[in-house]
């Protein structure tokens, strides 16, 4: 087995278990990174350069600076080890620069938890799985995922799903937006208890978020440059907690932007917003290539990974208004895997044209 196939197999297995096991995902990431490093050292691969390099470097460096100025630097530096996960972006860009590799890894994603099957699919030399396989698996996963989404009673996930679907519709099929609106109206008309019981701002969870955000703003005002330090919100929250808050402790502030600013300072928030803006802008540009006058007739099909990336990023950001989802390793790794797709498409074009990758 070549290093290239080993790297692809590890990435496919990672995609299959990213929502199931953090330990397995991180172990597979190590395998993929080692294979990638071996290829770099042997001169059989080139490190991808992307517009995300600047914001990624700035975000990582400021996080480490924030950890150094924390009231507990040792704990903050341990918490900052999640920065190592950003290497997944570059491993994925290198691995997914072909139609077949993307088909196999995205198909493995639908297998959800079947790591060995996902890795085997990527390593196989036959034509299966193909794009029809991914479509079939998606058709099977969508109803199950929709049921799980409703039963989860997680409002930020509902919001993220609506925004993600609307984004995909705007880019590819604007006329289908009425279907999304009709589905929302149908839910409001039928008023199922599972959904309606969560459509309120008067419950303890909503009230607690409001007072968490107030405490987070106080944290930022108190330490606007380097923040409280990565991983320090739980320990400092009691000092900033408003008396009306229902819960005495909070491990995080249930908002991506507020959490990053409170933890790492306002400059780090700017770097994070820079990263998000670049990732979404590049996904948008790749997704819109099919609409260009000189686009190849097959471009509409080939840009679907970029459309999916844009939809997922929009969904994660929308859900992140009410949840610190970028703080979850599994969510961050999935975001990095998806964010790599537009750059993998660009890398594939450059390689085909003989330009630097």
Image (cartoon, grey):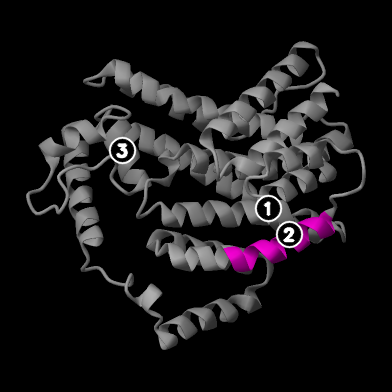
Q: What residue is shown at x 31% (from left), y 35% (from top)?
A: 266
Q: Residue 6 colored magenta?
A: no
Q: Position of residue 143 (x, y in %)?
A: 62, 68
Residue marked by disc 3: 261
Residue marked by disc 1: 110
* Pointer 1 or 2: first along the chain: 1
Dividing the image into 4 quarters, which one contains the N terminus? top right
Q: Element under label 2?
A: helix
Q: Is residue 132 visible?
A: yes
Mark 1 neighbour class, 10 Å CA radius: few under 14, some 14 to 19, many 20 or more: many
CA gap, disc 1 to disc 2? 6 Å
Q: Residue 132 colored magenta?
A: yes
Which range is magenta?
131-144
CA gap, disc 1 to disc 3? 34 Å
Q: Is residue 343 left or right of residue 257?
A: right
The foreground one among 171 and 308 is: 308
Q: What residue is shown at x 88% (from left), y 49% (from top)?
A: 128
Dividing the image into 4 quarters, which one contains the C terminus? top right
Q: Within the image, what quadrant is residue 308 found in?
A: bottom right
Q: Which mark is residue 123?
A: none
Q: Is residue 356 left or right of residue 63?
A: right
Residue marked by disc 2: 137
Q: Given this view, does label 1 or label 3 mark the residue nearer the observer? A: 1
Q: Position of residue 15 (x, y in %)?
A: 65, 42
Q: What residue is shown at x 73% (from left), y 56% (from top)?
A: 304
Whether residue 155 is situated above or below residue 277 in the rendered picture: below
CA gap, disc 2 to disc 3? 39 Å
Q: What residue is shown at x 43% (from left), y 35% (from top)?
A: 271
Q: Position of residue 224 (x, y in %)?
A: 24, 33
* Pointer 2 or 3: first along the chain: 2
Whether residue 82 is situated above or below residue 241 in the rendered picture: above
* Pointer 1 or 3: first along the chain: 1
């Amino acid at each position: 087995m070549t290093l290239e196939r080993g790297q692809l197999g590890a990435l496919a297995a990672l995609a299959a278990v990213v929502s199931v096991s953090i330990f397995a995902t991180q172990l597979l990431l190590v395998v993929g990174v080692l294979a990638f490093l071996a290829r770099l050292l042997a001169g059989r691969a080139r490190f991808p350069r992307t517009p995300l390099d600047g914001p990624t470097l700035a975000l990582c460096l400021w996080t480490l600076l924030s950890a150094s100025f924390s009231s507990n630097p040792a704990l903050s530096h341990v918490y900052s080890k999640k920065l190592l996960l950003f290497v997944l972006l570059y491993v994925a860009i290198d691995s997914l620069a072909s139609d077949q590799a993307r088909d196999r890894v995205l198909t493995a994603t639908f297998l959800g938890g079947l790591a060995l099957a996902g890795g085997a699919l990527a390593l196989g030399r036959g034509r299966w799985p193909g794009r029809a396989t991914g479509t079939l698996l998606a058709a099977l996963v969508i109803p199950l995922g929709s049921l799980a989404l409703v039963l989860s009673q997680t409002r930020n996930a509902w919001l993220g799903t609506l925004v993600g679907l609307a984004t995909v519709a705007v880019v590819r099929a604007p006329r289908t937006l009425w279907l999304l609106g009709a589905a929302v109206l149908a839910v409001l008309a039928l008023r199922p208890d599972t959904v309606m019981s969560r459509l309120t701002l008067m419950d303890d969870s909503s009230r607690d978020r409001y007072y968490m955000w107030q405490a987070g703003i106080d944290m930022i005002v108190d330490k606007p440059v380097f923040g409280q330090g990565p991983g320090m919100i739980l320990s400092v929250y009691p000092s900033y907690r408003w008396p009306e808050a229902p819960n005495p402790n909070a491990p995080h502030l249930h908002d991506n932007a507020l959490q990053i600013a409170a933890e790492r300072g306002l400059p780090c928030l700017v770097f994070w917003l820079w990263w998000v803006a670049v990732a979404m802008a590049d996904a948008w540009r790749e997704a819109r290539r099919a609409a260009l006058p000189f686009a190849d007739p097959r471009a509409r099909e080939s840009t679907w990974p970029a459309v999916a990336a844009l939809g997922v990023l929009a969904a994660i950001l929308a859900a992140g208004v009410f949840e610190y989802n970028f703080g979850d390793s599994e969510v961050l790794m999935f975001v990095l895997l998806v964010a790599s797709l537009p750059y993998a498409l660009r890398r594939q074009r450059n390689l085909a044209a003989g330009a630097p990758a």
